[in-house]
Amino acid sequence: MDRYLIRCLTGADLPLLRRWRQAPHVLRWWPQEGAEPPGQVDPGTVPSIVELAGRPFAYIQDYGVHDEPDHHFAYLPPGARGIDQFIGEADMLGQGHGPAFIDQHVRSLFGAGAPAVGTDPHPDNRRAIRAYEKAGFRIAGGPLDTPWGRALLMERRRDQAKCDTPRALT
């Protein structure tokens, strides 16, 4: 059973999203310059709110990596998705929620047919990189400059084991 409710963003969520986007821990990695207004995303992007026990605390979005010409994840197979996320509520940081809801969301994308999922944290965002690693992502390339900023390319493929620990053959 999934621990988190990951639901579509609604108009009623916009004040909460605006507040989160102003939080110092979010602004550091999601700056306002050039950012879309809260709730306004590209076609093909699925914006969602993450809740735990009825409390909204995070934002996650997924998008088709082949929807954008020359996207840095264009090398991923057809049907691949990209994700971006942040925890909006500061008191929810550092408790393992990030890797857990990311893993849950990625498993749902795999269940819907995505063969791979990419994410592109800033190379200096060690907290995000570690969260993605805990959620089964591997570094695939970079750092490089993208239209959305500096990025470290990370990916998780449906056919890869979440854990890279070698297993003994029996």
Image: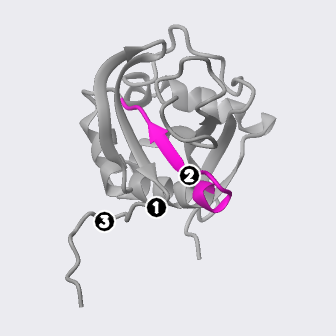
Q: Is residue 110 magenta?
A: yes
Of pointers 2 and 3, the one earlier in the residue sequence:
2
Please identify the quarter of the rendering in which residue 95 is found: bottom left
In this rendering, which labeled residue sits more in front, label 2 or label 3?
2
- Residue corresponding to mark 3: 163
Q: Nearer the viewer, residue 70 or 88?
A: 70
- Residue 57: image x %, image y %? 54, 48
* Residue 87 appearing in the image: no
- What amino acid is labelled 2 in the image? Pro
Vertical arrangement, residue 131 with respect to residue 32, above or below: below
Q: Nearer the viewer, residue 160 or 56?
A: 160
Task: Give the secondary structure at mark 1.
Answer: loop
* Residue 158 appearing in the image: yes
- Residue 60: image x %, image y %? 57, 42
Mark 1–mark 3 Cα distance, whole angstroms, equals 12 Å
Q: Which residue is found at the position 65% from the left and 56% from the top?
A: 113
Q: Is residue 134 magenta?
A: no
Q: Is residue 67 left or right of residue 89?
A: right
Q: Quadrant of the C terminus?
A: bottom left
Mark 3 Cα shell of 10 Å, populated few (<14), some (14-19), many (≥20): few
Identify the magenta region. Answer: 109-121
- What amino acid is labelled 1 in the image? Asp
